[in-house]
Amino acid sequence: MTNNIEDFGNAKCIFAIGTNTAEAHPVLAMRVRRAIRSGAKLIVVNPMEVDFVREADLWLRLNYGTDVALMMGMMKIILDEGLHDAAFIEERCENFEAFRQKLEEYPLERVAKITGLPAEQIVEAARMYATNKPSTILYAMGLCEHSHGTDNVIATGNLAMITSNVGKPGSGVNPLRGQNNVQGACDMGALPNVYPGYQAVNNDDIRKKFEAAWGTSLNPEVGQKLTEMLPAAREGKIKAMYIMGENPVRTDPDTDHVIKALNSLDFLVFQDIFLNESAELADVVLPAASFAEKDGTFTNTERRVQRIRKAIEPIGESKPDWWITCEIAKRMGVSGFDYESAGEIMDEIARLTPSYAGINYERLEECGLQWPCTSTDHPGTCILHSEVFSRPNKKGYFVPLEYRPPVEKTDEEYPLMLMTGRRLYHYHATMTRKVEVLNILMSEEIAQVNPKDAENLGIENDEIVKLKSRQGEVEVKVEVTRVVPEGMVAMAFHFAECPTNRLISSRPETLDPVTKTPAYKTCPIRIEKVDWVSARLNEAKSVTGEKELLLVLEKAAKDDAFLSLLAENPAAALANYDLTAEEKGAVSSGNIDKIEPYIGELDERLKKWFAARLQQEK
């Protein structure tokens, strides 16, 4: 984030694009609502009717994947109407003339056709953002997870610069990070092209600095991104992996591809606080300590470095991540890992990372510090780019952008577009699914389908359907809702029982060409009706045999008259079935837990469905 969270309150206009803030970032959403109550305008750009739409001054329900066209079109209007800041552009930016020429390719009529928006809404959005200063931009994965996600993000920077909405209170471009330390992981070099502090690995001077500090030679080549590593593993080019705090089987695209890749490794080490689907494939599992069991820091979405302090001793054999890594290194005979505490590691970070140079545990005792914090008397930086940009010539660079539609398109075979996202009650669900209350609030995945599409497909609310893509298929319950537009389906990916990412492509041509991020927001699919009850019962029969009780359940699932008779007169309903007295008593009770001992454990969704159906008749 260029600004900080508290600064949202200084904005006169909030441009929220590709973010479902109320569900994915509920605490930040409270700050946004506070700003709205103080008079700030809110523009929501999202094909889905997200929660903020109710409070928006303007909702742009654009076609999926058309964000670049929208923002370039808005900037042409801003320029044509003289709403740009010419002095700021002249003094603080470069390449504007080439950018101006590119804007000529985005007349209002073309932008309206691409985005599907009324022309007057595009004009209104441009004027609202440009004239209600300071204006701030908020975005999240809805902007990034496209085959052209990098272009989307660059467009937000162009929009901020052309109106001088950068480097001042209430302005800026503010990506909303999904987890408490995503920013910190990136800051510490958990990227293939940089050392800590975004220092390039292919810069000779920087590499020599780290080689001198660490007493070893370092590879000058840029490494692989995650979506490049897994294909390399399948091809035998990567022999081993060490996965920490991640669950690629749940979160990465094309689940079946991920499993095959991990199974292709000669050796897989997994380190986390809980076992999950990825851990089940590991050769070695190392138990890590949770945040409450260790000392350290988190760096949050506003670049604020904050202390975490050990509240309890690590449970069982779990250890802090840094300790585990150091012990592995020492046992491999590597020097330089003799740290006694997390504080010592923080001191090394400060010595080698200019943006963290002034940060240490002593200073963090009082409050968090926002980087860049370049010395121990530096107060930290609330707002970036207030005087200069962080480029070699200190100027912001306008990037002329070409609109590119999503690589994967719908067609006759796959006529609907799937967009994935998050729900309020779960995150990736490795941890949240272990919280009973959250499971009560949301216990299974749903596919949100527009009423018009549901009518055309002949499907109803709560019906179980099959979703198929070019990669795979899943079964899921339908929620018929106008929250999604016609032609679109929305799902999350929190539930192992319904691995949504099995549907998403990991093919190289569908990834963002720069970041290699998968297009989680645009996956063509089709929906098929399915007799899922019979399918599950057949699975049970294949295990337990053609038991009479299973035949009773199958008839109860399909025949409402039989179900009513079973509830009113069990003896009559079961007269023609070869059941023991105990089996008859179990089925007539309507309690599925009493039936299971005779037929074996049922699929969890089927169990819930039968329990509700039988009890409803009782």
Image (cartoon, rainbow, N blue to C red):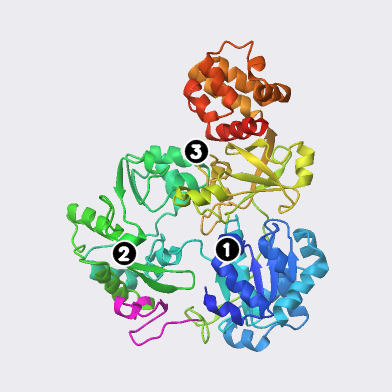
**What span is in magenta?**
356-382
Which mark is nearer the camera, 2 or 1?
A: 2
Indicate the amino acid at tag 1.
Ala
> The C terminus is located in which quarter?
top right
Residue 219 seen in this snapshot: no
> Where residue 87 appears, x then y in whole percent?
65, 89
> Where residue 336 appears, x then y in whole percent?
20, 64
Indicate the amino acid at tag 3.
Asp
Specify few, some or many for label 1: CA neighbours under 10 Å numbering under 14, 14-19, or 20 or more: many
Near-viewer residue (207 or 3): 3
Residue placed under numbered mark 1 in the picture: 140
Relative vertical location of residue 13 with respect to residue 525 in this rendering, above or below: below
Near-viewer residue (354 or 58): 58
Query: Which label belongs to residue 174?
Result: none
> Where residue 98 appears, x then y in whole percent?
66, 75
Image quarter for residue 341? Answer: bottom left
Residue contact between numbered discs 3 and 2, judged by CB atoms under 8 Å:
no
Describe the element under mark 1 as helix, strand or loop.
Answer: loop
Indicate the amino acid at tag 2.
Ala
Q: Is residue 359 magenta?
A: yes
Q: Earlier in the sequence, mark 3 or mark 1?
A: 1
Residue contact between numbered discs 3 and 1, judged by CB atoms under 8 Å:
no
Residue placed under numbered mark 2 in the picture: 311
Spatial separation of the CA atoms under disc 3 and disc 1: 27 Å
- Residue at the image position 45 percent from the left and 63 percent from the top: 182
Query: Which label belongs to residue 256?
Result: 3
Prevailing secondary structure class for the magenta stretch in the rendered image: loop
Relative vertical location of residue 111 with respect to residue 259 in this rendering, above or below: below
Relative vertical location of residue 306 with respect to residue 614 in this rendering, above or below: below
* 16 displayed left or right of 60: left
Describe the element under mark 3 as helix, strand or loop.
Answer: helix
Image quarter for residue 110? Answer: bottom right
